[in-house]
């Protein structure tokens, strides 16, 4: 009888582990398809709401912004900042003080960048499906991504995707510092035509601007 009980537990454990692995595989395949879809776009324009929340400090800040991406170039307009990058140089303009800082562009390894919110979900994560529901005729899936590299500054990401249209609705990045960054995409349009000069900063358009060159 004991042998049968042990065998039953063993079989249950094996089948349970297999089911969990299958679910992770499905979640990983879904994010892989969505990430590849975004990477295939020649460009994308997105409007979003960016929220920074720290529950320990009981603080929350909400900002609206828009993002243009063309290949490795981006233009980010959020709050009082305009950040433009042509993949070589990055300009950070502050409207409050009418100042622009110019620096060589060097993406930080392991950091979550707001200009990368559509394509940061590739390899390097463990995947889990938290919830699947129908909403307005669409299949909405909530996924949890845990980085395999424990040296990352964040310990998990929650992503809500529209599985029907294979688009990202929102993502939450949980920092080890206790801060949660939420990106809610309110509108997104792919493959628009952007001129290259949209990803260059022209100081002539800002009379009296102070230029700080850090290169």
Image (spheres, rainbow, N blue to C red):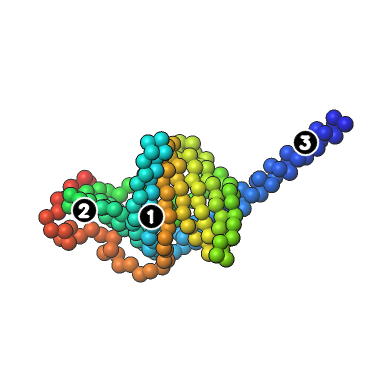
Taking the view exactly as shown, the residue that stands out farthest to the right is 1
Query: Is label 1 or label 3 in front?
Result: 1
Q: Is residue 29 visible?
A: no
Residue at image coords 56%, 61%: 135
Instruction: Report crowding for label 2: few under 14, some 14 to 19, many 20 or more residues within 10 A (C-alpha).
Output: some
Residue 181 x, y percent position in the rendering: 41, 46
As measured in the structure, the alpha-carbon distance from the residue carrying label 2 to the one carrying label 1 is 19 Å
Q: Do the residues bearing badges 1 and 3 touch, measured as CB atoms within 8 Å?
A: no
Which residue is denoted by mark 1 in the rendering? 49
What residue occupies the far top of the structure in this picture?
Answer: 2
Whole-Å distance between the Cαs marked 1 and 3? 48 Å
Q: Earlier in the sequence, mark 2 or mark 3?
A: 3
As drawn, the label of residue 95 is 2
Residues at circles 2 and 3 in contact by the CB criterion of under 8 Å: no
In the image, 9 versus 148, the foreground residue is 9
Element at badge 2?
A: loop
**Is 43 left or right of 26, judged from the image as shown?**
left
Labels 1 and 3: the sequence-earlier one: 3
Taking 200 as reference, is 54 above or below it? above
On residue 9, the disc is 3
Residue 212: image x %, image y %? Answer: 18, 47
Say whether marks 2 and 1 touch (CB < 8 Å): no
Q: Position of residue 67 (x, y in %)?
A: 35, 59
| Label 1 packing within 10 angstroms: few (<14), some (14-19), many (20+) | some
């Amino acid at each position: 009888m004991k042998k049968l009980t042990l065998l039953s537990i063993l079989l249950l454990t094996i089948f349970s582990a297999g089911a969990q692995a299958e679910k992770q595989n499905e979640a990983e395949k879904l994010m892989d398809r969505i990430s590849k879809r975004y990477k295939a776009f020649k460009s994308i324009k997105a409007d979003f709401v960016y929220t920074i929340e720290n529950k320990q400090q009981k603080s929350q800040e909400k900002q609206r912004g828009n993002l243009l991406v063309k290949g490795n170039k981006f233009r980010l307009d959020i709050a009082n900042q305009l950040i433009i990058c042509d993949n070589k140089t990055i300009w950070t303009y502050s409207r409050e003080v009418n100042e622009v800082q110019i620096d060589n562009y060097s993406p930080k390894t392991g950091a979550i960048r707001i200009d990368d919110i559509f394509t940061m979900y590739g390899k390097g994560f463990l995947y889990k499906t938290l919830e699947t529901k129908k909403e307005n005729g669409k299949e909405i899936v909530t996924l949890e991504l845990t980085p395999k590299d424990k040296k990352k500054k964040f310990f998990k990401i929650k992503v809500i995707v529209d599985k029907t249209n294979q688009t990202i609705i929102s993502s939450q990045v949980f920092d080890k510092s206790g801060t949660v960054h939420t990106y809610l995409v309110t509108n997104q349009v792919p493959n628009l035509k952007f001129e290259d000069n949209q990803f260059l900063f022209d100081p002539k358009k800002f009379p009296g601007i102070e230029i700080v060159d850090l290169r």
